[in-house]
Amino acid sequence: QVQLQESGPGLVKPSQTLSLTCTVSGGSITTAYYYWSWIRRPPGKRLEWIGYITYSGSTYVSPSLKNRISISRDTSKNQFTLQLSSVTPEDTAVYYCARLLGKDYGTGPSSGSWGQGTQVTVSS
């Protein structure tokens, strides 16, 4: 049974870079054909699909965040990481990592395996 756990700072100041790590257990992040994804839910809003890194190391990021997002992985630690630069209060959200099949990316929380989420607040 794969498990995902997000970790990172709960509070970030505006203009700083947010770094979140997803630690995976019970399965390898190099196993075909999974997409290791980042999703967030701002308060009172819908899920926002941030991007992913595939089992082979290919990445995709949302065009709306493209200039600020970096997704990478450390296969030796079985982790993948999200970096979001120049954060503003609009980046306040619960951030989730998930293991999805490609066809399920963008669909919803009923597909794949998700972490429990971590609250990130951007405030001075």
Image (cartoon, grey):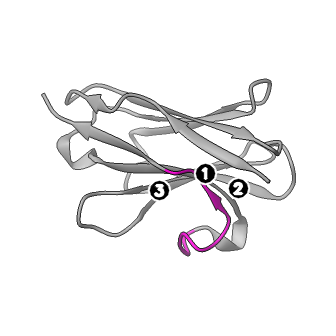
Tag on residue 62? 3
Residues at marks 1 and 3 touching, judged by CB atoms closer than 8 Å: no
Q: Can residue 120 be seen in this view?
A: yes
Q: Is the N terminus in the top left, top right, bottom left or bottom right quadrant?
A: bottom right
Q: Give the mark toward the camera: 3 or 2.
A: 2
Q: Earlier in the sequence, mark 3 or mark 2?
A: 2
Disc 2 marks which amino acid?
Tyr
* SS at mark 1 in the image: strand
* SS at mark 3 in the image: loop
Q: Is the C terminus in the top left, top right, bottom left or bottom right quadrant?
A: top left
Q: Give the mark toward the camera: 1 or 3.
A: 1
Residues at marks 1 and 2 touching, judged by CB atoms closer than 8 Å: yes
Q: In this view, does 31 lie to the left or right of 57?
A: right
Could you tell me which residue is drawn at 71 percent across and 66 percent down? 102
Disc 3 marks which amino acid?
Ser
Tag on residue 52? 1
User: Vertical placement of 23 versus 61: above or below?
Assistant: above
Near mark 2 (Cα within 10 A), the count class, few <14, some 14-19 or many ≥20, is many
**Magenta region, residue range:** 106-116
The overriding secondary structure of the stretch rendered in magenta is loop
The residue most toward the right is: 32
Residue 101 image offset from top left, x and y in percent: 73, 65
Label 2 sits on residue: 35
Could you tell me which residue is drawn at 76 percent across and 51 percent down? 2
Q: Is residue 98 left or right of residue 1?
A: left
Q: Earlier in the sequence, mark 1 or mark 3?
A: 1
Q: In this view, does 106 lie to the left or right of 119?
A: right
Q: Does the magenta stretch include residue 112?
A: yes
Q: Dividing the picture into quarters, in which one does residue 16 lie?
A: top left
Q: Which of 116 and 102 is in front in this view?
A: 116
